[in-house]
């Protein structure tokens, strides 16, 4: 006998208005000049606009950023490397972080990590999760999302906007369409 397959439910995602409000909220915090808020603005921009995984985000080094071509070199699951493009808003957030935010947190032991925590070490995925939860509290009617939920939101919005399914698959680093 073959057991029935469990139903798979679609994860919760932000709608386009909620995603826009999340980005605007992160920009308001960054405008105050707090280095952690500047970092969190970039976190939201990259997680949403690129659809990268939180581990890929936390693992980024300064050398992985090609600012001229606006590409990130990320190492995904199975140590697979891929190039992910990012847009002009993420570029502005990245430049603000690298020029003003990161230098305020960097220490002699920070190394090449793009994202730093309060004490100058590479940021932890749990810190990213907490930061995102704090941002989403200020967005009306937003579901409780993890950083992975922003990845799902990005994929959903790309497909709704007419992006090719194969291109979204490649950008997200999925080996199969399933």
Image: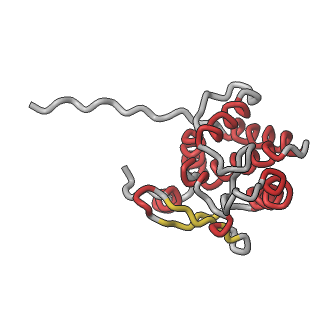
Which residue is situated farthest in the left direction here? Answer: 1
Residue 25: quadrant of the picture? top right
Left/right placement of residue 162 relative to residue 20 reads left
Query: Relative to 70, does residue 26 appear above or below in the rendering?
Result: above
The structure's colour scheme is secondary structure
Residue at left 66%, top 58%? Answer: 113
Query: Relative to 81, does residue 140 appear above or below in the rendering?
Result: above
- Residue 48 appears in the picture as rendered: no
Depth check, front residue: 116 or 134: 116
Left/right placement of residue 2 relative to residue 63 reads left
Depth check, front residue: 169 or 66: 66
What is the count of numbered marks? 0
- Residue 166 appears in the picture as rendered: yes
Which residue is situated farthest in the top direction here? Answer: 141
Query: Relative to 7, does residue 59 appear above or below in the rendering?
Result: below
**Residue 117, how many percent across, how many down?**
71, 45
Left/right placement of residue 8 relative to residue 127 reads left
Which residue is situated farthest in the front direction here? Answer: 108
Residue 9: quadrant of the picture? top left
Quadrant of the frame with the N terminus: top left
Residue at left 82%, top 44%? Answer: 27
Residue at left 44%, top 55%? Answer: 77
**Residue 162, how many percent across, how many down?**
57, 55
Residue 144: quadrant of the picture? top right
Residue at left 62%, top 28%? Answer: 143
**Residue 125, how many percent across, how many down?**
59, 43
Which residue is situated farthest in the bottom direction here? Answer: 68
**Residue 11, how many percent across, how many down?**
49, 34
């Amino acid at each position: 006998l073959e057991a029935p397959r469990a139903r798979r439910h679609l994860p919760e995602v932000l709608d386009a208005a909620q995603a826009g409000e999340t980005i605007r909220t992160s920009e308001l915090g960054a405008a105050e000049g707090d280095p952690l808020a500047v970092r969190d603005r970039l976190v939201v921009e990259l997680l949403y606009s690129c659809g990268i995984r939180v581990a890929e985000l936390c693992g980024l080094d300064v050398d992985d950023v090609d600012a001229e071509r606006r590409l990130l070199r990320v190492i995904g699951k199975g140590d697979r490397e891929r190039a992910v493009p990012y847009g002009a808003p993420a570029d502005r957030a990245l430049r603000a972080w690298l020029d003003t935010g990161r230098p305020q947190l960097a220490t002699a032991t920070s190394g090449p990590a793009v994202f730093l925590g309060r004490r100058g070490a590479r940021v932890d995925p749990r810190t990213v999760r907490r930061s995102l939860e704090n941002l989403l509290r200020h967005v009306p009617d937003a579901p409780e999302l993890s950083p992975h939920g922003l990845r799902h939101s990005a994929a959903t919005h790309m497909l709704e906007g007419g992006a090719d399914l194969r291109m979204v698959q490649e950008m997200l680093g999925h080996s199969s369409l399933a």
